[in-house]
Amino acid sequence: MEAEKNTRELLTNDLLWAIRRFTRSSLLLQQVIAEEIGLYATDAECMDFLMEMGPSTAGDLARAMRLTTGAVTNVIDRLEKKGFVERKKHPTDRRKVIVHFLPKNHAKAKLRYDALVSGVLELFEGYNSEQLKFLVEHTTALMAIYQENTMAVSSDKK
């Protein structure tokens, strides 16, 4: 029983370190790709949110990214200047502007992400359906923990 406890503790510790290294490598990759296309990592994250959320207001992006609207406006300005997004008038509220992602101008970064996706898909080929289901559940639960902690840190600042 003691050996099993020690093994579990060691595996848990190994998993925590693996998650840390994975998170760190993900952040570094995002930064390197962003720099390659002349952006900041926050700019690249904004584009990622736009791809997921679809056309959005600066306020929607600010809430999603946990930034002020002023900071997001600066991000949008940089992205618009580089041709990654465009602003359009809101169809019913003339005070608002909707930010649209322009995928055609994302080709250079897309090549980098396509290579990443290709490698990840190759890794997934080695898993059966039950293992993939577990990984989806695990990653979703892990993301919820990260989001919960993000919310806690954000609320502590207020």
Image: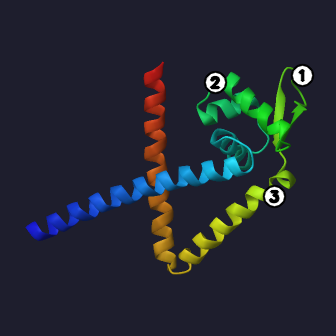
- Residue 10 appears anywhere in the view: yes
Residue occupying image coordinates x 46% and y 44%: 146
**Circle 3 residue:** 107
Q: Which residue is denoted by mark 2 in the rendering? A: 68
User: Label 3 amino acid?
Assistant: Ala
Residue 51 drawn above or below residue 122: above
Nearest the viewer among 56 and 74 is 74
Q: CA distance from mark 2 to mark 1?
A: 21 Å
Location of residue 141 with respect to 72 vertically, above or below: below
Say left or right for 92 vs 60: right
Residue at label 1? 94
**Label 3 packing within 10 angstroms: few (<14), some (14-19), many (20+):** few
Task: Give x and y (percent) for residue 27.
Answer: 54, 49
Comparing 23 with 55, the one in front is 23
Q: Nearer the viewer, mark 2 or mark 3?
A: 3
Q: In this rendered view, identify the residue nearer to me: 60 or 70.
A: 70
Dot 2 or dot 1, earlier in sequence = 2
Q: Quadrant of residue 115?
A: bottom right
**Mark toward the start of the polypeptide (3 vs 1):** 1
Indicate the amino acid at tag 1: Arg
User: Which residue is more in the foreground, 151 or 119?
Assistant: 119
Image location of residue 39, percent across then percent down? 71, 42
Q: Nearer the viewer, mark 2 or mark 1?
A: 2
Q: Amino acid at mark 2?
A: Thr
Q: Quadrant of the N terminus?
A: bottom left
Residue 131 falls left or right of residue 74: left
Mark 1 residue element? loop
Q: How far apart, in angstroms, are the residues tagged by discs 3 and 1?
A: 32 Å
Inter-mark Cα distance, 2 to 3: 29 Å
Element assignment for label 2: loop
